[in-house]
Amino acid sequence: MVLVCISLTSRISRSIAIGAVLALASVAAPQALANEGFLERVVALDHGVDGLPLSFRLADGAGLLAVGRQDDVWRFSVIALADGRVVASGVLPETAFFYDAGDPQGLGVDRICLLDERGVTVLDPVSGELTRIADVASVYHGRPWLGPSHSDFVRDVDEDGADVILVPQFDGWLLARRHDSGFDQYLLKVKPRVAASQQWISYEPRAPLIGDVDDDGLNDLVFLADTEFVTFVQRPKGNFSTPGRHDRINAPLATEAQRARWQREDGQVDQSDLEIEEVEIVRDFDGDGILDLLTEKSISEGVFDRRSEYHLYIGQSEGSTVKYAAEPDGSITSDGVQFAALVVDVDGDGRMDIATPSTRLGLARVVGALFSGRISVDLDVYRMRPDGRYPDESDYQTRFKVEFDLKTGLSRYPAVAIADFDGDGAAELMVQEETDELTLYPGLAEQPMFGQKGQILSLPLPRNGQMVEARDLDDDGRSDLLVRYGPADGEKRARELRILLSDGPD
């Protein structure tokens, strides 16, 4: 259920090297198409789709919320997955900074939730009625000149079906939890990242992480602040301990002061002997319910002599705190420039495996890429062993091409995903090998991880493969495919959404 995102926007260490090298919307019924094992529909909208469509709970089943701009107006469409029809559409208020989907009022169905400078408003997509439910201050003031974008500010913290509101403020985060006819509010103080100049000032709130730190059955809120965790422990009555507890991370991470200095130097950093280790992912890797750390250490001995190491630090519960060893519990080494690591349980054993997309930088490779308009990207998959470690060599490797046109500036990224489409517990490998074809290689519980003979899915694909998403849309335990398109795919196609629901044997 994880999409392999090949992004050329990466961390400071990667950008240094790359910069040095390369200065009611649908009138007609949705179309039902045939790809074996999938129920496929094409939904025509009256607007484009900006960002990933959100899951949206309807009274009679699962749905999707798609938002996009048309003629400088931000429009929305709610789509019922049962038949692929648009069941509601309309315009989002221009005062909203962010939108989300959720049920903070406990109605049993989702609403479109909007965050503006006054607080949170919910929009009934069918009636169009707007209701302000919480007056909360945030860091966002005025009116957004770029239009609303998605933010995950309505969340089910306790995983009990009851959504809460999480909004960043200048001195921390405000959590608003429904109580009777109103909302109880709790301030979680944690300082944001602040950058300033004579012309501007920016506040970057720290992302909230959710996990049961003290093993009492209640989820707590954790924030990564520089090289330490700030933890707010949830109490039985739903409030949180304040102030937050500060726990230092023993891993040798680059500090925020160091990263700020590298940014100020605008890439003019001596790369002959440069090591940068930063937190990449915080989540449970080994299935014990405790948050673990995956860091990326970039090692450079020159512009064209680079490698990356992923280090896994397993969290150990000690009383009401979580401790991490100074040395990693598992490591993966990869040559070249790394893109975002992918974490997915490939074999269904409850432990998280890691897929690492990377490309090697060398003078000959760069020159060859400029002439051919192609860059090779290696995808290595490492399976976690029962002791929490990863092998020295990858368990599986494949390669694909990223194409770019220096004249037009357009690029083509292939769609690649690792997800369990048939619900058997073993994830399949999906790779775009032709312009309008996806190949689905069956997942195997043992080596070599994926079968050699794949199923072909024929459908129009976007130039940007990141717009092909694999996730379980209808909550049946099987991943589905959601395909959207961008301006580079044509004006008509950009207003189209393609849904492929897994329809294989249960």
Image: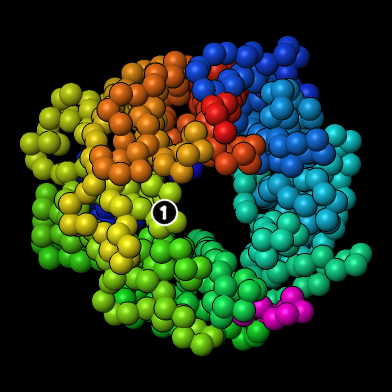
Looking at the image, the residue that sits furthest to the right is 181
Label 1, residues with CA under 10 Å away: few <14, some 14-19, many ≥20 = some
Q: Is residue 5 magenta?
A: no
Does any portion of residue 6 appear in the rendered image?
no
Q: Which residue is mark 1?
A: 349
Does any portion of residue 304 appear in the rendered image?
yes
Q: Is residue 229 left or right of residue 266?
A: right
| Residue 2 image-quadrant placement | top left
Please name the residue shown 47% across and 39% down the image: 424
As shown in the figure, which amino acid type bears the numbered disc 1? Answer: Asp
Is 15 in front, or is 355? 355
- What is the span of residues highlighted in magenta in the rendered image? 233-240
Residue 174 horizontal/vertical position (percent): 69, 70
Is 447 in front, or is 408? 447
Q: Is residue 213 left or right of residue 442?
A: right
Residue 85 horizontal/vertical position (percent): 73, 22
Residue 168 horizontal/vertical position (percent): 64, 66
Q: Is residue 197 left or right of residue 396?
A: right
Image position of 487 with respect to 179: above or below: above
Residue 148 horizontal/vertical position (percent): 66, 44
Helix, strand or loop: magenta stretch: loop
Image position of 289 with respect to 355: above or below: below
Please name the residue shown 79% across and 27% down the image: 87
| Residue 417 image-quadrant placement | top left
